[in-house]
Amino acid sequence: MKELIFGTHCLLALLIISSGCTKDPSKPGVAGLVTEFGTDKPINNASVYGIDCEGEPLGSISCFRTDSTHTNADGYYSMPKEPAWVVAHASGYWAADHLAPVLHKKELATNVSLYPFAWLKVTIRNESGAYAISSSEINTIFPLQQVS
């Protein structure tokens, strides 16, 4: 009798555990948005890569790309496999210097922000009549032309 009860409990435990491990095939492994840092404007046609790593805890670690996709016009992407990290690249934006971790079992959405290229245009106007300026940080003398 004890064997029958024990066997029933084991079978019931197996059924509960296996039913909790099934994944809904209609949902992606990971999904999210790629946006511009600061403005949160969506970036279309950005390349998004799934990254996984393997190795020893205190030894060598090798990382590799598991999946790749592109964002749509709204900056949205999805990948069928669930990677450990997500990284994105887009034209006109600096390469991401960090990997966005995928939150396992809690939230399978990862948003990535990219920094846009920025340019600074500086115009120096010589209104004092000086012949040159110097900078102690650069240790260079810049000759000035008189602007009329």
Image: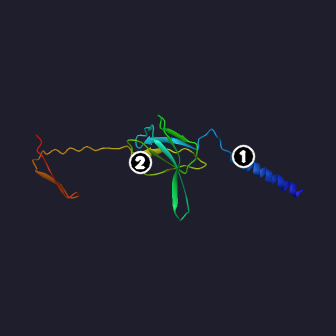
Label 2 CA crowd tier, 10 Å (few <14, some 14–19, many 20+): some
How far from the left and from the top, in percent, is residue 134? 17, 55
User: Could you say which is closer to the camera, residue 59 or residue 9?
Assistant: 59
Residue ranking furthest to the top? 73
User: Could you say which is closer to the camera, residue 44 or residue 148?
Assistant: 44
Q: Which numbered dot is residue 81? A: none
Image point (54%, 44%), residue name: 109
* Residue type highlighted by circle 2: Ala
Q: Name the residue under label 2.
A: 95
Image point (76%, 48%), residue name: 15
Real-space Cα distance between discs 2 and 1? 41 Å
* Left or right: where 33 falls relative to 24: left
Image point (51%, 55%), residue name: 63
How far from the left and from the top, in percent, is residue 127? 12, 44
Residues at marks 2 and 1 touching, judged by CB atoms closer than 8 Å: no
Q: Which numbered dot is residue 19? A: 1
How far from the left and from the top, in percent, is residue 19? 72, 46
User: Could you say which is closer to the camera, residue 127 or residue 81?
Assistant: 81
Classify mark 2: helix, strand or loop: loop
Q: In which quarter of the image is the N terminus?
A: bottom right
Image point (76%, 51%), residue name: 14
Q: Quadrant of the C terminus?
A: top left
